[in-house]
Image (cartoon, grey):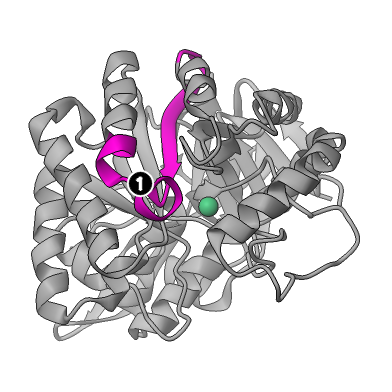
Amino acid sequence: MQSPYQLVAKGSYTLKNVRLETGFEYDNEEVIHTKTDLFSVEIENGKIKNISPNNPNSNAIDAKGKLMLPAFRDMHVHLDKTWYGLPWQTLSPKKKTVKDMIAYEQEIIPGLLKTSVERAGQLIDLLQGYGTNYARTHFNVDPTSGLQSLENLEKALDNKKDSFGAELVAFPQHGLYYTDSVPLLKEAVKLPQVGFIGGVDPLSIDGSIEKVLDVTVQLALDHHKGIDIHLHEVGESGMKTINYLIDKAVENPELQGKTFVSHAFALAHLSPKEAEEIAEKLAAAKVGIASSVPFSGKVMPIPTLKKYGVQVLIGNDNVQDYWSTFGSGNMLQKANLISELYGYRTEYQLSRALEFATQSIIPLNDKGEEQWPKTGDVADIVLVDASCSAEAVSRMSDVEALMNKGNLFWKE
Ligand SMILES: [Zn+2]
């Protein structure tokens, strides 16, 4: 796949006929409709300079009545290792455990790295086509990859720097001690472009929750980085790992707001009361959860986490690789999936669910007051073929244009 977009404007320019949400229409207490109007939106130096009543007769760029929304963000994806761009293949039924997958990665990574710059670029094109301009992407640090996975990922990101941004997680996929990855992680954490350090199933891969998390936490503190631990373990070891991280965040306030557990499948196995208790603790310690919203028999308690104010980030995780081939790359599809899974059906609920694609900001607040866009906001924007946020989530509407820091790209 090639980039579906063409650059049509950068620097200072104005868009006309931009559809923005202006409020809710109520029937008694119930939101029955979202009100919109057309505006002119001025962009300057990567930011929104001014929003004014529509001037349809100006010679501004015509947004043709498309709905303007904040650009989407994918907060858990592996741009560095993918089959995307290679001939179709699916998962081997023989490889079941994470350790099986580590052995398999050791076999195939040298081959994948030969073309990973190009294929990471193709995967970014796919994400952008669905309106994503930013990702939290993990990159392997393990004795097989060394730091080459990072180098290739950085080349791919540099090729897209006008249209796409990312935060990078150094991810010791093959364990810190199961394979000798501590020295590599220590090298990676020093790099300014690395924002987070990761980890995977400390007990089942490395045999110790404390040994792995103590090193990880210390490295994060020493280098002022965030943490994002991938935790597939369920039951006692899963919950112990989550609680251990919560305790560390309470002890070290610097970690709060930048410590995350990805997957956290253990939470899907809790009773409603237990889910409420851990949600309260996660929120108090400002430890977030990153989820691709899986539902194989068990469902993550996302509404409970949100109710207590836990930061919940959503991502595609594996778009097309040997871990999973189900990621669509489309963040509106994730918001749609969440809506269907948790029964968000009304105009109001669907409009709120857009936050799972934007990862926080949405045009109207819970009272229906305009909160986005505002003068001075970074111009990270999509123009969508929908009449309102609720329709965009429900219909997974097409994205017509993507703006990254004021650079406007339009589909051909
Ligand atoms: Zn992952």
Seen at 16% across and 66% down, the residue is: 307
Camera-nearest residue between 302 and 387: 302
Q: Name the quadrant containing residue 32.
A: bottom left
Secondary structure beneath dot 1 equals loop
Camera-nearest residue between 173 and 22: 173
> Is 105 on the left or on the right of 27, as rendered?
right
When the figure is inspected, residue 36 is found, relative to residue 161, above or below; the finding is below
Q: Which residues are magenta?
A: 190-213
When the figure is inspected, residue 56 is found, relative to residue 153, above or below; the finding is below
When the figure is inspected, residue 265 is found, relative to residue 155, above or below; the finding is below
Seen at 24% across and 53% down, the residue is: 242
Q: Name the quadrant containing residue 16.
A: top right
The kind of residue on which mark 1 rests is: Trp
Residue 93 at what x, y percent from top left? 71, 76
- Residue 342 lies in the magenta-colored region: no
Camera-nearest residue between 128 and 315: 315
Q: Within 8 Å of ligand 1, the CB of disc 1?
A: no
Q: Name the quadrant containing residue 147.
A: top right
> Is 194 on the left or on the right of 62, as rendered?
left
Seen at 85% across and 41% down, the residue is: 111
Residue 167 at what x, y percent from top left? 50, 32
Residue 239 at what x, y percent from top left? 22, 61
* Residue sticking out furthest to the right: 87
Camera-nearest residue between 64 and 361: 361
Residue tagged 1: 372
